[in-house]
Image: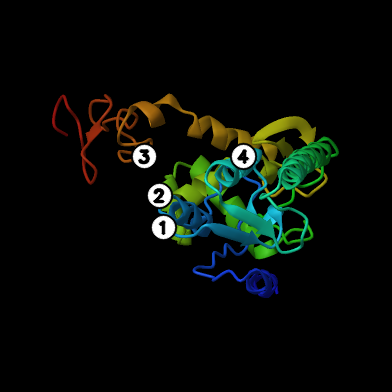
Amino acid sequence: RQREDCEALAASRGWKVVSTYVDNSVSASKRKVQRPEYNRMVADFKAGGFDALICYDLDRLTRQPRQLEDWIEAAEDKGLLLVTANGEADLTTDGGRMFARIKASVARAEVERKSERQTRAARQRADLGKSPGGPRLMGYKLDGKIHESEAQTVKRMFELFSEGETIKGIGAQFKLAPSTVRTILTNPRYAGRAVYRGATTGKLGNWTPIVPEALYDAVQARLNDPRRITNRVGTARKHLGSGLYLCGVCGIPVRTNGPRYWCPKGGH
């Protein structure tokens, strides 16, 4: 529909359409979001590919005042004819340029207000102990209630890690990537703790925890063990009993290479 209106305007002005640029479902308000077709349009204009530009609405072109100024400069200095199909803006006139600047500023302000409202709502949910929105957390249903089979898996992951199993080993057992396992093990929500921007708020959530707080804390202590950071072999129990088991003959601690134990004094 928008393309049809733009093409009708081009026909009414006797302009030949040489290219169409469409970025479906790509935000025009976020600076860091890449808009492939928009970038192609900018490159084509710099290369002399067209001398007039029709957009359905200025919001469809950009909501960034800095980008709008680039197009206004192109209209003023390079003769670009830029108009909107809804008739609200025409950068070929000084009045149109003033309107465009005002509208872009208002649109940008609304984006910032919306962001602030969303941030405030997320903070309020955390303060009230409500679960945050977003993707469904493994172990919970969309309504926040326990998903029994998944919850058992999550709790078993915590238990296995606290018992000495490695993240990689847990991932292999449950067919999950190690990064996924670590994300689960470090999520305070599983212990019923409210979270805001990745940090606990000190309050309990209004949902049912999957793991006891003591188990969660024990897992965090092992995850933060300095040996897991400074060595290259991890903290898995590869030589269980080495330095602990005693020789049955002479009573000193035995050593092991994995399958066998021996006494370093008498070779028992």
Point 54% across, 68% down: residue? 20
Q: Is residue 164 above or below residue 85?
A: above
Mark with earlier residue (4, 2): 4
* 3 vs 4, front mark: 4
| Res 69 label | 4
Towards the viewer: 20 or 222: 20
Q: Is residue 188 above or below residue 52?
A: above
Towards the viewer: 127 or 175: 127
Residue 110, position as x, y percentages in the image: 79, 43
Gap in angstroms between the C-alphas marked 1 and 3 = 17 Å
Gap in angstroms between the C-alphas marked 4 and 1 = 54 Å
The residue under label 2 is: 168
Q: Are marks 3 and 4 in contact (CB under 8 Å)?
A: no
Q: Residues within 10 Å of mark 2 (few under 14, many from 20)?
A: some
The residue under label 1 is: 172
Label 1 secondary element: helix
* 4 vs 2, front mark: 4
Residue 19, position as x, y percentages in the image: 50, 68
Label 4 secondary element: helix
Point 74% across, 47% down: residue? 96
The residue under label 3 is: 237
Q: Residues within 10 Å of mark 1 (few under 14, many from 20)?
A: few
Residue 175, position as x, y percentages in the image: 45, 61
Point 68% across, 69% down: residue? 9
| Res 214 label | none
Q: Residue furthest right?
A: 128
Label 3 secondary element: loop
Mark with earlier residue (1, 3): 1
Mark with earlier residue (4, 1): 4
